[in-house]
Image (cartoon, helix red, strand yellow):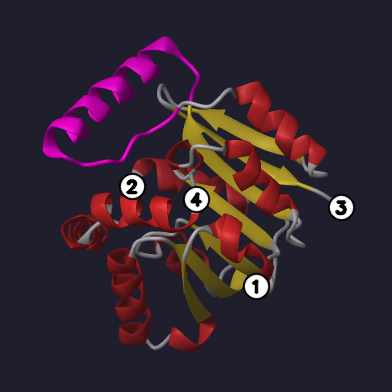
Amino acid sequence: MSGCCQSAVAECHFGPEKAREQLDAYRSGGPDRLTQIALAMLREQPITDAGLVDVGGGIGVLGRELLGDRITAVTIVEESGAYLSVARAQAEGDGTFASWRFVQGDFVDVAPGVGRADLVTLHRVVCCYPDYATLLSAVSATDARWALLSYPRDRWYVRAALWAEDCANRLRGDPFRSRVHPEEGISRTMREGGFRRVSETETWFWRVEVHARS
């Protein structure tokens, strides 16, 4: 599922209330633990003067934390208009708006036009997409030298937790569903796109990986 159907699901699940909740949490406590792990892993790599394409970038936390550090320009590709509105307002408010670009849509559809993409991040995004191979192939089709992925581990207890979450969403009439994709399939797709994994870590629930190519 992609295009308008996928976007409609994102608009339903990732609406204004969740966007405000994430903004409040970020303002009060900074990046959450998994995002801190992702940031630390990126800062270990020789990434400099790079253009970031943050797929499913939400309210723009990764871009905000990296801008002026390793990153000189940020493009957020996000299906939720509510999240994009919050990210745009933050950039306007802190005077960095000229360094940002905001693209609403499915990354698979808009990837050819995203522009400079030295680094592509998919932070908690792969699990939101039904066809992970098509999504990751879109990353490979950019000129990115670096990619960061974070996604749920392929473990029974993770599947059980997401099943319970999906049941709760179903009861609320929320069409969003999370997916656990095969780790080896993800690795194979990245290798086929010319990437090699250079860093990885795990929590009990998540895998975080940095991939690079020459």
Instruction: Using a 10 Å C-alpha cutoff, classify the residue at mark 1 as few (fewer than 14 neighbours), some (14 to 19) or many (20 or more).
Output: few
Q: Secondary structure at mark 3?
A: loop
Q: Secondary structure at mark 2?
A: loop
**Would residue 174 appear left or right of 111 to someone viewing this image?**
left
Instruction: For marks 2 and 3, give the one nearer the viewer.
Output: 3
> In the rendered image, is residue 45 in sight?
no
Quote the CA–CA distance across marks 4 and 2.
28 Å
Question: What amino acid is labelled 3 in the image?
Answer: Ser
Q: Nearer the viewer, residue 146 or 194?
A: 194
**With respect to residue 4, does 51 lie above or below?**
below
The picture places residue 95, in percent across and down from the top left corner, at 39, 88
Q: In the rendered image, which residue does mark 4 sit on?
A: 2
**Would residue 9 appear left or right of 104 to someone viewing this image?**
left
Of callouts 4 and 3, which one flags the residue occurring earlier in the amino acid sequence? 4
**With respect to residue 105, does 44 lie above or below?**
above
Query: Residue placed farthest to the top in the image?
Result: 156
Is 154 within the magenta? yes
Question: What amino acid is labelled 1 in the image?
Answer: Gly
**With respect to residue 45, does 34 lie above or below?**
above
Instruction: For marks 4 and 3, give the one nearer the viewer.
Output: 4
Q: Secondary structure at mark 4?
A: loop
Question: What amino acid is labelled 2 in the image?
Answer: Asp
Please report contact status of discs 1 and 2: CB closer than 8 Å, yes or no.
no
**Residue ID at (49%, 23%):** 153
Prevalent SS, magenta region: helix
Of callouts 1 and 4, which one flags the residue occurring earlier in the amino acid sequence? 4
Q: In the rendered image, which residue does mark 2 sit on?
A: 32
Quote the CA–CA distance across marks 1 and 2.
30 Å
Please report contact status of discs 4 and 2: CB closer than 8 Å, yes or no.
no
> In the rendered image, is residue 209 in sight?
yes
The picture places residue 145, in percent across and down from the top left corner, at 76, 56
Q: Secondary structure at mark 1?
A: helix
